[in-house]
Amino acid sequence: MKKQTHIIVFRLSAMGDVAMTVPVIKSFAKQYPETKITFVSRGFLKPLFNDLENVDFFTVDTNNKHKGFSGLFRLFKELKSRKPTHFADFHNVLRSKVICLLFSVFSNIKIVRINKGRKEKKALTRQHNKTFKQLKTSHQRYADVLNNLGYYTEIENFNTTKKEKLSDNNLLVTGIKTLPWIGIAPFAAFPSKTYPEDLMFQVIEGLSKENVQIFLFGGKADMDKLQPVESKFNNVVSIAGKLDGLKEELNLISNLDIMLSMDSGNAHFAAMKGVKTITIWGNTHPFAGFAPFNQPKDFCILPDLNKYPALPCSIYGNKTFSGYEDVMRTIEPKTIIEKIKSELL
């Protein structure tokens, strides 16, 4: 009897990067239904994979059980006990390299690591002599790992993703849907990727005048920032701190008609749910390959590249050039409002 193919896929962080694996894994599972997948990542990200067939989620605990080299060796033994036939390293960092090394020494499975394109990304983000061109998307880089393992994966589109039934807990927050729902995720990991607060207020104010319901996304730490905005408008609700974890957040996102987000995790959550996703970009740029899955190019709203020709300044938004701190102020609120209205109303 032929041994079942069992691929371990390893990607620990960050939220947006892990979310970008979902369309790839979903496509792969559909094209290879007899193949088993174990996805290795941090436990709080498990809801991203709840509805994927043939996918088993393995939780890594880097703070305790799998901390340090001894913890990584324990992780290796636990993964090896699952008898994988292939190892797909979607991360290519020190932890995953150690696991790959251990598998190469103590087993004979096939191993492929992702090519992150670091050299070409450096050329895209340097201030001078920049090579400004579209790079391969992260989605395709993930697919290439599977391709190199011998399993050609064509990434499929999921525009017709069925909206989930709202959970009872979410209904207590949202009420029954009677109007178009707009999600707005106004925060990002770095200031250079975050649309200025005063301009975002103008966006919310403009959209609130339409016959829509607006939900503001954020974590518990954002409650104090979002509550005053919520209080000013009858059709704006902050969900910060009100939902029970990522599973409930994804459930709500799947019922949105449109999501407005920074270059951040919420954009990828919405896109993987088949929701129209409009993104606002600052010191990063879609050319780096991190645009949300299957969204039109004009859904990416960019700063004035004529005024700021050295954009992008970085891949992740953690670096900026002198004088480029306020590039997002070249994006007018009315531009964002009109774009959303043209797609929704």
Image (cartoon, rainbow, N blue to C red):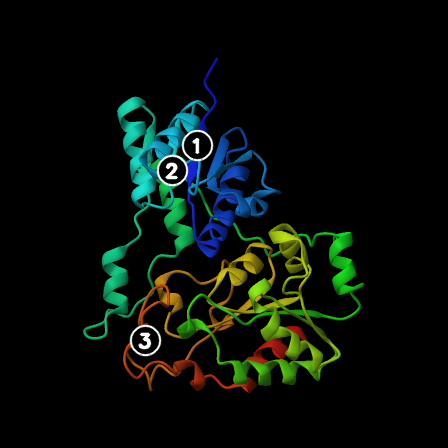
State the residue at coordinates (40%, 51%): 140
Residue position marked by numbered label 3 in the rendering? 311
State the residue at coordinates (37%, 68%): 317
Residue positioned most to the top: 1
In front of the other: 6 or 154: 6
Q: Separation of disc 1 and disc 3 at Cα?
A: 38 Å
Relative to 275, 19 lies left or right? left
Quadrant where the C terminus sits is bottom right
Give the answer, above or below, for where 333 lies relative to 82. Answer: below
Query: SS for tag 3?
Result: loop
Query: SS for tag 1?
Result: strand
Q: Where is residue 268 shown, x and y percent of the image? A: 51, 58
Q: Separation of disc 2 and disc 3 at Cα?
A: 33 Å
Give the answer, above or below, for where 115 lies relative to 314. Answer: above
Disc with the residue nearer the chain's start (1 vs 3): 1
Relative to 148, 298 lies left or right? right
Q: Where is residue 74 shown, x and y percent of the image? A: 39, 29
Residue 335: in sight, yes or no? no
Q: Where is residue 245 shown, x and y percent of the image? A: 62, 52
Question: Which amino acid, mark 3?
Answer: Leu
Disc with the residue nearer the chain's start (1 vs 2): 1
* Residue 7: assigned label: 1
Q: Where is residue 63 shown, x and y percent of the image? A: 43, 43
Residue 35: in sight, yes or no? yes
Question: Which amino acid, mark 1?
Answer: Ile
Residue position marked by numbered label 2 in the rendering? 88
